[in-house]
């Protein structure tokens, strides 16, 4: 591992973490008098360490997906006593499975004690009077495996048609910054900012427990919720297929395109329309015309989904709502292979 000679703010580095052996990925936030403030990529929190202790990250390590999962704080942890701590350790040792039960902005963890589902918060605090109210156990249809919404979409609320052109977008400044490279088609790429706000929005925009049962047939470029695997996400219609029963949709926050059936499409609640589109569409600057297809095929290989990389935004947004970018580490590889 090579020491860092000229550290730059926003750079991915390798740094030590007291509780663990070895070096761990982090983002350089600030430097002062030979010390560096860092935020760990794969763990919560950060640290202040000597700059000389930081190491450079190679391309292979920097492209590995982030393993950290951010979740809201569990409401009763600050109130538990030693007995509660011992009980938690016992659950961890037994690898007990927990389920999340969600009710609006409140959630609770449930576990099975061998005969019935039990509220973990009530077990830990030994009281039914909680400072933060948690819901009673729900039916299996209401149980979800992750916290997804601060407010669930209401079937009865007024839903106004929203087109793609009505939506706000995440805006980028020119220059270098770290981004999550969500998906690359070769010719284009969808980026996501790594800020806490974007992470929070992503959690809010995934619907696992759809209450609305009314099918919806949106027009081209109209916004909707569409189902992908077991969840529902914001999408816009690219094409209404001739059969009248299916649609080509773009999942606007992620950049992937899919065919969905009419029964897997719902109206977009107003609260979802208020959140800007998080997926940032971009094209690659400086690709030679005579090698375009070779370069695009290679870019798909070099840019695995969910890799965190430094991106250099070269041009502002165009009429197709795309930014022009370069990815320095990837472009260096393409130059080595004489593709640029």
Image (spheres, rainbow, N blue to C red):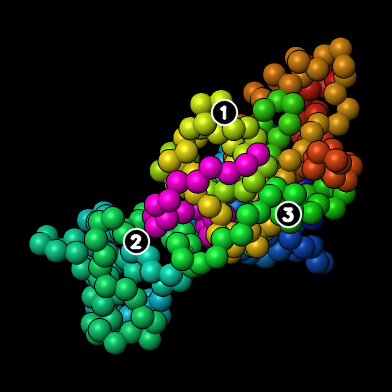
Q: Is residue 165 above or below residue 314?
A: below
Q: Residue at x 86, y 12 (%)?
A: 290
Residue 180 has which mark? none
According to the picture, the residue beneath numbered tag 2 turns out to be 100
Estimate the x, y position of residue 167 in percent, counting from the top left: 71, 54
Across the whole image, how many numbered discs are drawn on residues? 3
Q: Residue at x 74, y 26 (%)?
A: 187
In this rendering, position of residue 25 left or right of residue 71: right
How crowded pointer 2 is (Cα within 10 Å; few <14, some 14-19, many 20+) is rated as: some
Estimate the x, y position of residue 238 in percent, counting from the top left: 65, 35
Q: Quadrant of residue 276?
A: bottom right
Q: Is residue 216 magenta?
A: yes
For the residues labelled 3 and 2, the Cα–Cα distance comes to 34 Å
Who is closer to the viewer here, 81 or 98?
98
For the residues labelled 1 and 3, the Cα–Cα distance comes to 24 Å
- Sequence-first tag of 2 and 1: 2
Who is closer to the viewer here, 223 or 121?
223
SS at badge 3: helix
SS at badge 1: loop
| Labels 1 & 3 near each other (Cβ < 8 A) | no
According to the picture, the residue beneath numbered tag 3 turns out to be 166
Who is closer to the viewer here, 1 or 223?
223
Estimate the x, y position of residue 311 in percent, counting from the top left: 78, 42
According to the picture, the residue beneath numbered tag 1 turns out to be 241
SS at badge 2: strand
Q: Is residue 103 magenta?
A: no
Magenta span of residues: 200-220
Q: Residue at x 46, y 54 (%)?
A: 207
Does residue 40 appear in this view? Answer: no
Does residue 261 appear in this view? Answer: yes
């Amino acid at each position: 591992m090579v020491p860092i000679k000229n550290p730059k703010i926003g750079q991915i580095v390798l740094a030590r973490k007291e509780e663990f052996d070895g070096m761990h990925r982090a983002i350089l936030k600030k430097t002062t008098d030979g010390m560096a403030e860092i935020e760990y990529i794969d763990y919560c929190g950060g640290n202040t360490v000597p700059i000389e202790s930081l190491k450079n990250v190679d391309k292979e390590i920097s492209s590995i997906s982030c393993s950290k999962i951010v979740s809201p704080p569990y409401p009763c942890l600050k109130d538990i006593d030693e007995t509660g701590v011992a009980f938690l350790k016992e659950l961890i040792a037994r690898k007990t499975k927990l389920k999340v039960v969600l009710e609006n902005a409140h959630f609770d963890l449930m576990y099975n004690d061998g005969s019935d589902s039990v509220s973990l918060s009530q077990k830990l605090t030994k009281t039914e009077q909680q400072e933060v109210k948690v819901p009673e156990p729900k039916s299996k249809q209401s149980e979800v495996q992750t916290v997804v919404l601060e407010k669930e979409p209401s079937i009865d609320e007024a839903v106004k048609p929203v087109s793609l052109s009505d939506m706000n977008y995440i805006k980028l400044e020119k220059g270098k910054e770290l981004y999550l490279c969500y998906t690359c088609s070769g010719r284009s790429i969808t980026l996501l900012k790594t800020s806490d706000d974007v992470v929070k929005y992503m959690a809010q925009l995934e619907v696992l427990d759809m209450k609305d049962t009314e099918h919806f047939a949106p027009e081209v470029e109209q916004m909707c919720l569409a189902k992908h695997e077991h969840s529902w996400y914001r999408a816009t219609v690219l094409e209404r297929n001739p059969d009248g029963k299916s649609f080509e949709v773009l999942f606007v926050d992620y950049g992937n395109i899919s065919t969905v059936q009419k029964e897997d499409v719902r109206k977009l609640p107003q609260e979802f329309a208020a959140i800007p589109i998080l997926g940032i569409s971009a094209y690659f600057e400086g690709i030679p015309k005579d090698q375009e297809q070779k370069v695009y095929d290679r870019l798909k290989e070099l840019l695995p989904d969910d890799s965190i990389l430094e991106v250099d935004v070269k041009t502002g947004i165009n009429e197709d709502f795309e930014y022009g970018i370069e990815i320095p580490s990837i472009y260096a590889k393409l130059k080595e292979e004489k593709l640029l």
